[in-house]
Image (tube, grey):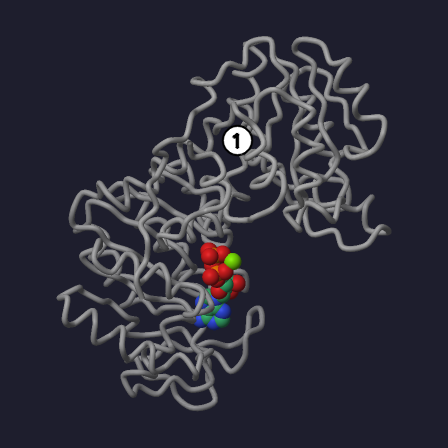
Amino acid sequence: MSRSQSPGLKGIKTIEELPIEGKRVFLRLDLNVPLKGKEITDDTRIRGALPTIKYALAKKTKLILASHLGRPKKREDFWKYSLEPVASRLSELLDKEVVLFDDPMGDGIKGMVAGLKDNQILLLENTRFAPEEEKNSMEMATLVSSYADVYVNDAFGAIHRAHATVDAVPKMFKFRGIGFLIKKEVEMLDRLLFHAEKPFLTILGGAKVSDKMGVIENLMEKVDGFVIGGAMAYTFLAAQGINVGNSLVEKEKIHLAKDLLERFRLRKKSLALPVDHVIAEKLEANVPTKTTPTAAIPDGFMGLDIGPKTIELIKAEVSKAKTIFWNGPMGAFETPPFEMGTFSVARSLSECKAFTVVGGGDSVTAVEEAGVAEKMGHISTGGGASLEYLEGAKLPGLEALRQ
Ligand code: ADP
Ligand code: MG
């Protein structure tokens, strides 16, 4: 498959290069935080948006903020997905009033926006409440673009979506660009793609081979080696004719795994697959487990984590590398005791000398739970967006800003 390589941030202005002083600025953020009821369980994404917000405030802008939250489908769900808790947390963090406007496409908005004063913050309610958002509607673009003079996107977690506030809206602005979060994310991922110090090791895990195919293909010529663990590994082991018992295998992907094994060999890329596993009869908390002596898994059992020999093997690979990208847990880490492999790999990365980047929702959770998040070189806040970028895909949210 041929892939066009993303031209990074070429032709895209950063907020520092835009004439925002005293202007009305539409700032698209990713404030899609996890909620338990109305309680924010992790405010990382809100804090991630602060540098750009504070910079804009220092320039005396009139700020119009927008974000999606969750996947609201029907009108009755709206209260559940309201940005109200976000407005309140943001207001606390900035020590400043944040007005939430609940009808961003209604009649009242025009007056509201026109009446904004320097340094005032208006947060528009969940962009996905309007069906036009996911339809990337031109109508919405025309309307929303009338609210502000300058458009800034800092919603890294949403730039792979061709949604109105990410794609159609910015195209209507003469002055448009990115904030500090997107800049940092893209620079870090570009460092992997174009300036990785060798040896460059990519560690992949997680549930599905099919999710990670594009990344393997695009990184194939850039890395020196791969480590493949997690449920993904069983499809590769099956492709080598090794018994994998009842482990998760994508049968229809076995031929693809065979092709990839051959490609790794031809290109002389090292590949480490699990040499032992922690197995059980079913995936359930605190079930009786066994450790296999070899890569084979007996019938009636599932591989649910990598074994101790594999942990050591990965540690050795990690210690040789100068650049490491990790995506995808090594086992079913949410269910004890199958977190050992994933947490051990997280610790190995935190102790090594390489530049380390961790991407992917579950992998980032695992690194945080292992208590080593601060020791990573970079943690990518947008799982889907970072993977698509590393696949070499053109992301709508970046392309819409390129001039
Ligand atoms: P990320 O969100 O970091 O990209 P994925 O979504 O691809 O990662 O995969 C994470 C999921 O893979 C987790 O829910 C984890 O439980 C599951 N997983 C990993 N290894 C196994 C395994 N051996 N058996 C079952 N599930 C697994
Ligand atoms: Mg995931």
What percent of the width, then of the height, locates residue 89? Answer: 69, 28
Q: Left or right: where does residue 400 sit relative to residue 355?
A: right
Dot 1: what SS?
helix
- Rendered residue at 28%/63% (across/down): 227
Query: Which quarter of the rendered picture does the N terminus lie within?
Result: bottom left
- Quickly name the residue at label 1: 48
Can residue 255 be seen in the rendering of this structure? yes
Which picture quadrant has residue 101?
top right
What percent of the width, then of the height, locates residue 179? Answer: 48, 27
- Rendered residue at 43%/18% (across/down): 17
Query: Which quarter of the rendered picture does the C terminus lie within?
Result: top left
Q: Left or right: where does residue 87 sit relative to residue 57?
A: right
Mark 1 CB within 8 Å of ligand 1: no
Can you name the residue that lies furthest to the bottom here? Answer: 299
302 and 381: which is toward the camera:
381
- Rendered residue at 37%/78% (across/down): 235
What percent of the width, then of the height, locates residue 241? Answer: 29, 88
Q: Left or right: where does residue 81 sit relative to residue 62?
A: right
Above or below for 256 versus 159: below
51 and 120: which is toward the camera:
120
- Rendered residue at 27%/49% (across/down): 324
143 and 183: which is toward the camera:
143
Characterize the local packing of mark 1: few (<14), some (14-19) or many (20 or more) Cα atoms within 10 angstroms. some
